């Protein structure tokens, strides 16, 4: 992997990375949420705790690093569905714990996905062709 340098000054550039489309990010979020619920059940942490919420936030961050920023609410929605259905209310039943609680959980998962996706979406400056040769 080669990094490029701009002519005036010594600013380093990262190469263009491949980002997933939002619909593919949603599909991976659903599969990842199911796999994480299965893994949490195997460890015995399938209960509403900070560990389980942190695990889903880490999953959203990991999926966000490979996705575009508009996919963050979709990734968070998939994580929230599995967290609410299998961790909080068990047996795949979605429940409502109040607007403040559910909105805070969804906002945390969305912020985690955005933390992963925003650094890859920073604007890049134009690279001069004379330096590449």
Image (tube, rainbow, N blue to C red):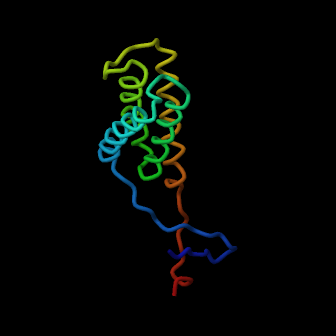
- Comparing 94 with 110, the one in front is 94
The outermost residue toward the bottom is 133
Please determine whether, in this image, residue 114 is positioned above or below residue 99. Answer: below
Disc tally is: 0
Q: Is residue 49 above or below residue 117?
A: above
Q: Is residue 41 positioned above or below 27 on the image?
A: above
In the displayed image of the protein, which residue is found farthest to the right? 9
Identify the residue at image location x=43%, y=34%.
Answer: 40
Question: How far across and how far down the image is residue 130, in percent?
Answer: 54, 84
Q: Position of residue 46 (x, y in %)?
A: 43, 27
**Closer-to-camera residue (38/102):** 38
Residue 110 is left or right of residue 75, and the answer is: right
Between 47 and 74, the residue placed more toward the observer is 47
Along the line of sight, which residue is nearer the eye, 52 or 73?
52
- Residue 103: horizontal and vertical position, in percent? 48, 21
Q: Residue at x 46, y 23 (%)?
A: 47
């Amino acid at each position: 992997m080669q990094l490029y340098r701009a002519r005036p000054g010594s600013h380093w550039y990262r190469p263009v990375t491949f980002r997933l489309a939002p619909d593919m990010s949603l599909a991976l979020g659903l599969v990842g949420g199911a796999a994480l619920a299965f893994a949490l059940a195997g460890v015995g942490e399938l209960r509403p705790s900070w560990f389980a919420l942190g695990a889903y936030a880490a999953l959203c961050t990991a999926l966000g690093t490979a996705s575009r920023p508009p996919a963050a609410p979709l990734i968070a929605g998939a994580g929230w569905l599995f967290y609410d259905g299998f961790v909080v209310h068990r047996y795949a039943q979605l429940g409502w714990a109040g607007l403040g609680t559910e909105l805070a959980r969804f906002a945390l998962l969305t912020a985690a996905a955005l933390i992963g996706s925003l650094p890859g979406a920073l604007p890049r400056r134009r690279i001069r062709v004379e330096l590449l040769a």
